[in-house]
Image: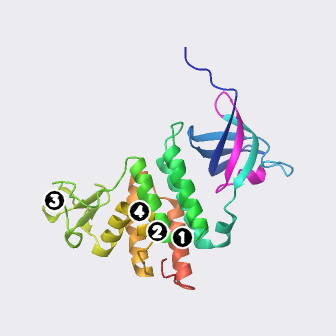
Amino acid sequence: MPSRIPRVTKTVAIVLKSRRLGDADRIITLLTPFRGKIDVIAKGLLRPRSKMAGHLEPLTMTEVLLAHGRTMDLVTQAQSVETFAVLHNDLQHLSTAMYLLELTDRLTVEHADATEIYEILERSLRALAREDGIQLVTRRFELDLLTVTGFRPELDRCLETGEPVAADEAFWTHRGGGVISSDALANYPEARKIDSHVLRVLRAYQSLSYEEASRIRIDPDLAGRLEQVMHEFVRTQAERDLKSAEFVEESRRVSLGVDAESDA
């Protein structure tokens, strides 16, 4: 006989997003380690006296008690574990954090074990909060998440021949999912030459340990080119534009007008 679904479950979760449901309720999208991405209902969350309101905001790690419902579980208790308050104090960090949440939401299937994805997201948010380089955190998050979800880009070998491709001779196809040599151009009409510096950094981010990758210095110009390549790729994998990606790009441009970071 199939196991009975528990009437009440307790889990830690990261709030990815929320949307209104009627006059006082909200549907909250949670990323949990073992149940994966789930939508739950928080009744009365919009009422002024709601005790759960501050604990179910996007970009909050929270511990929730869920009561099993017919279509969606109901949140009966919520207590913040980490609010990442420091990320709300800076536009670049906030926009980056929201991008990590949106990309996680787009590439994660519902009701499936998401232990690795949860660990990647939590680790990245904590790294962002301690002010590790934004480029390092974001690009490593993208590459790790893409790998776990089955969309790992091929950065070293030609998609067509399987042979190694030199960085200064590589072409990039975001639709094909990686690099190709000039011999394969006929089969990838959308491919274009990829900047060798961008490719070398992405290869390093994909293959080196986090500590080793953190030693790579990224100037603002290179940061913009890395961002362009990866945002184009993840938009293709997510099969739609990411609003937060546009926010990230704009906030970086605004920040550069005021204070250009050496590691972006």
Identify the mark nearer the N-term, 2 or 3. 2
Question: Secondary structure beneath disc 4?
Answer: loop
Say few, some or many: other residues with alpha carbon within 10 Å of mark 1 (under 14 / 14 to 19 / 20 or more). Answer: some
Dot 4 and dot 1 residues touching (CB under 8 Å): no
Give the mark count: 4
State which region is magenta. Answer: 53-72
Q: Which residue is mark 4?
A: 209
Above or below 95: residue 81: above
Dot 4 and dot 2 residues touching (CB under 8 Å): no
Question: Looking at the image, is mark 4 or mark 2 nearer the viewer?
Answer: 4
Q: Position of residue 145 (x, y in %)?
A: 45, 53
C-alpha span from label 1 to label 2? 7 Å
Q: Position of residue 92 (x, y in %)?
A: 57, 72
Q: Residue at x 54, y 36 (%)?
A: 111
Judged from this view, the residue extending furthest toward the right is: 49
Amino acid type assigned to the residue bearing label 4 in the image:
Ser
C-alpha span from label 2 to label 3? 31 Å
